[in-house]
Image (cartoon, rainbow, N blue to C red):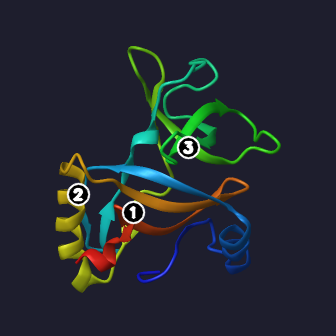
Amino acid sequence: GATGEQYLLVGDIPETRENVRNGGAHYRFLCEPVDPHDPFRGKYIVLTFAAERYEGALDTAAFPEGSWAKALLDTDEEGFAIVTSLEKEPVPGRDHIDVEVVRWMPDGGARLHFPFDRFYMDEELAGPAETVFRESLRDTASRTWADVDVRDGIAVMREVRIDGVPIRERI
């Protein structure tokens, strides 16, 4: 919703949301710049993530451009989410999200697209939030990320934070 968790679910099943929120693993996805307006859905911030640049080994025959993969997740030394490998099937005991392999990179790896890329806001907050969001991404001393819970391949976005502070509190 506009003021609470935002869910990426087919059918948006409340029981599944609660299972992910209450029992899912928590990840911080480091943000990168972008931002449009969708007149049919309301105002939102488009999020792109550093972890969408997958630099690991990639079997281009198994994952052609436009295909979907299970992106196995872990965290880096700063606590931000990273993709450690792309798999065809879930790996027991490992958190994953379904991602699209957008394109292969010339030097190896791939550009991925995560299924959670929009953070919807109340319309009166969206404009100021966009400004604060863009400024935070230009500030090299600042860290902007999305708090996302993951369970069984399902992602629930809770918040966008700038240096640990929810974006709504920065406007």
Residue occupied by mark 2: 136
Q: What is the C-alpha distance between the residues marked 1 and 3? A: 15 Å
Q: Earlier in the sequence, mark 2 or mark 1?
A: 1
In the figure, 6 relative to 133: above or below?
A: below
Q: Does 35 appear above or below 82?
A: below
Q: Nearer the viewer, residue 51 or 11?
A: 51
Q: Is label 3 in a helix, a strand or a loop?
A: strand
x, y percent for residue 114: 49, 48
Task: Mark 2 vs mark 1: give the one in front.
Answer: 2
The residue positioned 56% from the left and 37% from the top of the image is 83
Between the C-alphas of marks 2 and 3, the distance is 26 Å
- Residue at coordinates 22% horizontally, 78% vertically from top-left? 171
Residue 141 in percent (x, y) is at 24, 49
Tell me the residue at 73%/55% (across/down). Answer: 152
- Taking the image as shown, residue 71 lies to the left or right of residue 101, namely right
135 in relation to 41, above or below: above
On residue 118, the disc is 1
Furthest residue to the right? 92
Q: Is residue 155 left or right of residue 108?
A: right
The amino acid pointed to by label 2 is: Ser
- Closer to the N terminus: mark 2 or mark 3? 3
